[in-house]
Image (cartoon, rainbow, N blue to C red):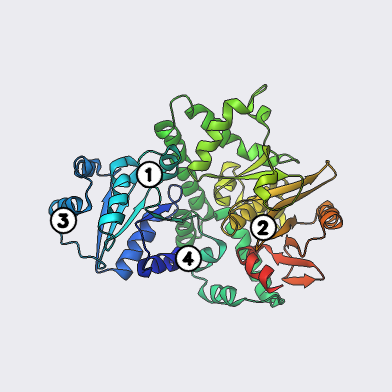
């Protein structure tokens, strides 16, 4: 299963300013597989330490954190010769050994010729708490669930993926390929991008097997809430997590605390929401009333929407029936289009650092607003809802942006200032914007 992050990892390997790398990402998105595959392809030798499955390895970091001493200890313990540039050292589930995380500072300062990558399922929690974080001494990358293009490759659609990758300008997609890509995209909304779920679909073509995998992932997340969250927050984290589908099923998808529990207040649940965000399990999209740069300065911290990191897990949480895939474009309208909206949040998050949505005095709402190259772009979803088109027109009348973005089942096309991006092509949006 080839992941797009391989290209970034290869660039990191040859970068003259390379530092020890921290790979972020939620549990079961394929961090371990990606690192081991990268190591097997690009190094003569891989040294792999997992501090969760082999907690005794943490003892190696109880004494001196000098890079020289640690390299000697690792070499003796694992009975291998560690060769600079030829050996990749992987610290997996490094949040279980804070001293190993701290040691990255000394590897950077004393032995940067050695290639080291640290990864962990809940590493974001560790870094948010500031314990053992080697400030300024590491590089960062993030791994998310498989994108739609990665899904095509992982399920054996190499020729379709080759065509997808070759699209570089705003021109109509041949009708037969457009329809074929839409069909695979509908399947992706159900399967999602968790690697094990994708493999289950590829190997069995059985949506019930996919659902079993997704339910197992959801169970693992719930166990993480109980095991790793602060004792007084575990129940609240579960409440927020399990309530997200209900929030997205509302006509107004703004997160409302009283939906969690009657009389609930932000102060009771804001730590739980932050925990989920630090764990990489959710994307938070803030409201803006005035789309001006920098967008963050105009965000309202009290009004936001929450989406899951993987659309397939959302489909599993609402127990979406695979039969919906047989009925035309019904999957795009399931519980008020939330599957598509969640997917768009995923795809945009991979391209833009922060996401926002715009409202105007209750009269209009644009689903997403992003910034790129010092310009602001409204991004609207259209799945047979004329009110959406009206919202985009209201935004245009007020702010006259350079481009209006509409994501729909229609073909790729630029009509005056409206760029229609097919839903399955959304991960190329910034490229289309630059081409227009």
Disc with the residue nearer the chain's start (2 vs 3):
3
Kindly state the secondary structure of the residue where label 1 is placed: loop
Nearer mark to the viewer, of 4 and 3:
3
Nearer mark to the viewer, of 1 and 4:
1
Residue 90 in percent (x, y) is at 30, 55
Residue marked by disc 4: 4
Residue marked by disc 1: 133
Mark yes or no: residue 176 visible.
Answer: yes
Residue marked by disc 2: 371
Q: Tell whether 212 sits left or right of 71.
A: right
Q: Tell whether 390 sits left or right of 254.
A: right
Quadrant including the C terminus: bottom right
- Do the CB atoms of the residues marked 2 and 3 lie less than 8 Å apart? no
Q: CA distance from mark 3 to mark 1?
A: 25 Å
Residue occupying image coordinates x 50% and y 52%:
210
Local crowd at mark 1 within 10 Å, few (<14), some, or many (≥20)?
Answer: some
Disc with the residue nearer the chain's start (2 vs 1):
1
- Do the CB atoms of the residues marked 3 and 1 lie less than 8 Å apart? no
Kindly state the secondary structure of the residue where label 2 is placed: strand
Mark yes or no: residue 97 visible.
Answer: no
């Amino acid at each position: 299963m080839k992941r797009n992050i391989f290209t970034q990892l290869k660039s990191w390997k040859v970068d003259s300013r390379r530092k020890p790398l921290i790979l972020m990402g939620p549990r079961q998105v394929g961090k371990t597989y990606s690192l081991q595959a990268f190591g097997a392809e690009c190094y003569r030798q891989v040294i792999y330490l997992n501090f969760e499955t082999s907690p005794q390895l943490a003892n190696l970091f109880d004494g001196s954190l000098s890079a020289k001493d640690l390299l000697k200890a690792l070499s003796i313990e694992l009975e291998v010769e560690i060769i600079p540039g030829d050996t990749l050292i992987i610290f997996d589930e490094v949040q279980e050994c804070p001293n190993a995380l701290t040691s990255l500072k000394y590897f950077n300062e004393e032995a940067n010729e050695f290639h080291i990558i640290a990864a962990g399922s809940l590493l974001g929690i560790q870094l948010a708490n500031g314990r053992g974080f080697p400030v300024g001494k590491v590089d960062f990358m993030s791994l998310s669930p498989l994108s739609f293009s990665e899904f095509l490759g992982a399920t054996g659609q190499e020729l379709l993926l080759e065509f997808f990758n070759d699209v570089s300008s705003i021109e109509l997609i041949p009708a037969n390929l457009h329809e074929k890509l839409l069909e695979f995209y509908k399947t992706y909304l159900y399967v999602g991008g968790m690697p094990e779920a994708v493999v289950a679909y590829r190997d069995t073509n059985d949506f019930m097997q996919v659902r079993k995998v997704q339910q197992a992932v959801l169970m693992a997340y719930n166990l993480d809430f109980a095991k790793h969250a602060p004792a007084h927050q575990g129940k609240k984290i579960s409440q927020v997590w399990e309530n997200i589908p209900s929030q997205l099923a509302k006509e107004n998808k703004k997160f409302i605390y009283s939906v969690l529990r009657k009389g609930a207040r932000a102060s009771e649940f804001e730590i739980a929401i932050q925990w989920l965000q630090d764990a990489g399990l959710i994307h938070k999209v803030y409201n803006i009333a005035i789309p001006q740069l920098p967008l963050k300065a105009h965000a309202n911290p009290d009004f936001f929407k929450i989406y899951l990191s993987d659309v397939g897990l959302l489909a599993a949480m609402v127990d979406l029936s695979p039969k919906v895939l047989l009925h035309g474009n019904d999957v795009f309208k399931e519980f008020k289009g939330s599957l598509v909206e969640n997917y768009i949040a995923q795809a945009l998050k991979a391209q833009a650092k922060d996401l926002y949505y715009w409202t105007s005095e209750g009269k209009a709402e644009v689903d997403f607003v992003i910034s790129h190259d010092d310009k602001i772009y409204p991004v609207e979803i259209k799945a047979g809802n004329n009110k959406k088109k009206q919202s985009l027109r209201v935004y245009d009348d007020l702010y006259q942006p350079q481009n209006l973005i509409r994501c729909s089942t229609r073909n790729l096309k630029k009509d005056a200032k409206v760029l229609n991006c097919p839903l399955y092509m959304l991960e190329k949006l910034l490229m289309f914007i630059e081409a227009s």
